[in-house]
Image: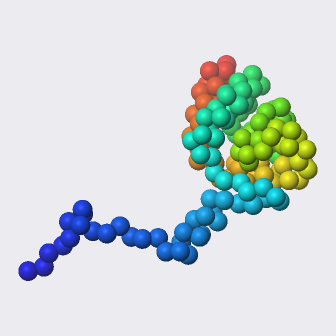
């Protein structure tokens, strides 16, 4: 008689060293001298007040989601987040705000893109509905 192992008896597949190293490479990225990792819960807790400022700024300037898909929209977005950018970099990378302010512009750009890429699903889940709500409330 053939029997199948019950779910509780089955062994979970083990991650090979290659898979583990690949996951680490996806999760962490080195930009210049900085190792950038996806946000932990602790980093998200630190970032929430900063992100709240970003949402209020977007609301104040009536930022539309579709505008972010254009070069002008991206430039406007960067202009709006510039005052909080040192805080975002500081918390995300684990450096002081003073160190963030001293970073070269090209290093800031690449670091910000990596931070966004690593945390895109969180940002979409947080910012997307908020921006849509703001957009619907401000629509005339």
Residue 130 location in percent, x, y? Answer: 60, 30
Q: Is 140 situated left or right of 5 in this image? A: right
Residue 97 location in percent, x, y? Answer: 82, 38
Display colour scheme: rainbow
- Residue at point 66%, 53% (across, down): 37
Q: Residue furthest left?
A: 1
Q: Is residue 128 depicted above or below 9 in this figure?
A: above
Which quadrant: the N terminus? Answer: bottom left
Q: Is 9 situated left or right of 68 in this image? A: left
Which quadrant: the C terminus? Answer: top right
How many numbered marks have been drawn onto this rendered protein structure? 0
- Residue at point 75%, 26% (across, down): 57
- Residue at point 67%, 28% (across, down): 49
Q: For this rendering, which residue is in front, 26 or 73?
A: 26
Q: Is residue 9 depicted above or below 82 in this figure?
A: below
Specify whether residue 76 is in view: no
Specify whether residue 15 is in view: yes
- Residue at point 78%, 55% (across, down): 34
Q: Is residue 103 depicted above or below 65 in this figure?
A: below
Residue 79 location in percent, x, y? Answer: 85, 35
The answer to which quarter of the image holds residue 22 is bottom right
Q: Is residue 124 depicted above or below 113 in this figure?
A: above
Q: For this rendering, which residue is in front, 23 or 72?
A: 23
Q: For this rendering, which residue is in front, 56 or 21?
A: 21
The answer to which quarter of the image holds residue 138 is top right
């Amino acid at each position: 008689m053939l029997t199948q192992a019950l779910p509780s008896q089955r062994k979970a597949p083990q991650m090979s060293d290659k898979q583990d190293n690949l996951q680490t490479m996806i999760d962490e990225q080195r930009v210049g001298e900085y190792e950038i990792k996806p946000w932990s819960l602790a980093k998200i807790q630190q970032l929430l007040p900063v992100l709240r400022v970003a949402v209020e700024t977007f609301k104040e300037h009536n930022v539309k989601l579709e505008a972010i898909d254009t070069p002008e929209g991206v430039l406007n977005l960067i202009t709006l987040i510039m005052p909080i950018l040192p805080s975002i970099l500081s918390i995300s990378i684990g450096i002081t705000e003073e160190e963030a302010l001293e970073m070269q512009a090209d290093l800031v750009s690449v670091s910000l893109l990596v931070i966004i890429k690593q945390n895109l699903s969180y940002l979409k889940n947080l910012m997307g509905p908020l921006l849509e709500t703001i957009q619907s409330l401000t629509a005339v």
